[in-house]
Amino acid sequence: MKILKVLLACFAVIIAAFLLIAAFLPAEYTVSRSISTTAPPAIVFANVNDLKAWDAWEPWSNMDPTIEIRYSKSAIGEGASYSWTSEKSGQGTTSITASEMPNRIATRIDFDGGGGDGEFLFEPEGAGTKITWSMRGDLPYPTGRYFGPLMDSMVGGAFEDGLQRLKTQSEKDAQSIGGLGKVLGQGMHELGKEIGKALEEAGVDMGKAVEDALGQ
């Protein structure tokens, strides 16, 4: 009986120490990697702003032959998304939450057991571009906190591989008419969205004007 009490006391101390240490560990993680390319920002931006173009450079799908991807109605720009299912990686969704041509793209990833917010920055560097890919996410207390110090080493390598692939694809596109077509196509897509918003807003205003006239 005495041995049992000692064991229970030791177990309680271990649990208390586990919880106490977790309380002092970071509550969120951040992973960031950068690479330079000779391709201009507009070309690199186009390869990230179109989710269907991710197949050429995104690291995880290239490592997982079992993955199946389904795209939203529009795969380009803010609001675009794709969902995946995989025997190895489970299931989840990636979406573009902000698209600021040609400087910045923000993303959100949600999967079984977690998620994170991503960001791509495209900074002019001479005639080329400095690409920075970062991601941050919350670490649930208490167990998740212990993964915080490991996230950089766990995810950083994949970021480096993806950026190298993005660099290679973008430099290839910069030398072809197809790359220019990507940029022009996305420019027209964004212009169409802005025109649509303007017409929608004008329609709302016109409707109010008609209501006011009829009410007089």
Image (cartoon, grey):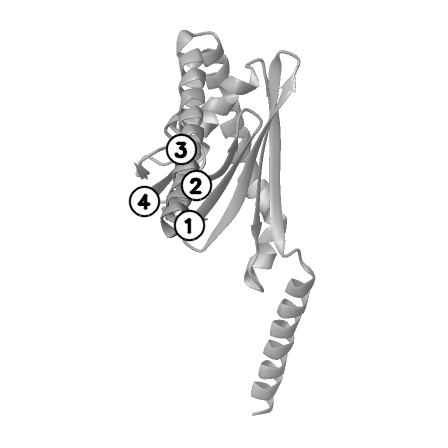
Residue where numbered disc 3 is placed:
199
**Labels 1 and 3: the sequence-earlier one:** 1
Numbered disc in front, either 3 or 4 = 3
Q: Pick the residue in front: 213 or 148.
A: 213
Can the viewer see residue 167 in this picture?
no
Q: Give the alpha-carbon distance from disc 1 to disc 4, as whole Å.
A: 10 Å
The residue at which mark 2 appears reads as 205
- Identify residue type, mark 4: Thr
| Of callouts 2 and 4, the N-terminal one | 4
Q: Which residue is disc 1 drawn over? A: 111
In front: label 2 or label 4: 2
Mark 1 and mark 2 lie on one chain; the one further toward the N terminus is: 1
> Looking at the picture, which amino acid does disc 1 mark?
Phe
Compare marks 2 and 3 and give the one earlier in the sequence: 3
- Badge 1 marks a residue whose secondary structure is strand
Q: CA distance from mark 1 to mark 2?
A: 41 Å
Q: Is residue 123 above or below residue 212?
A: above
Residue 54 location, quadrant: top left
Number of marks drawn: 4
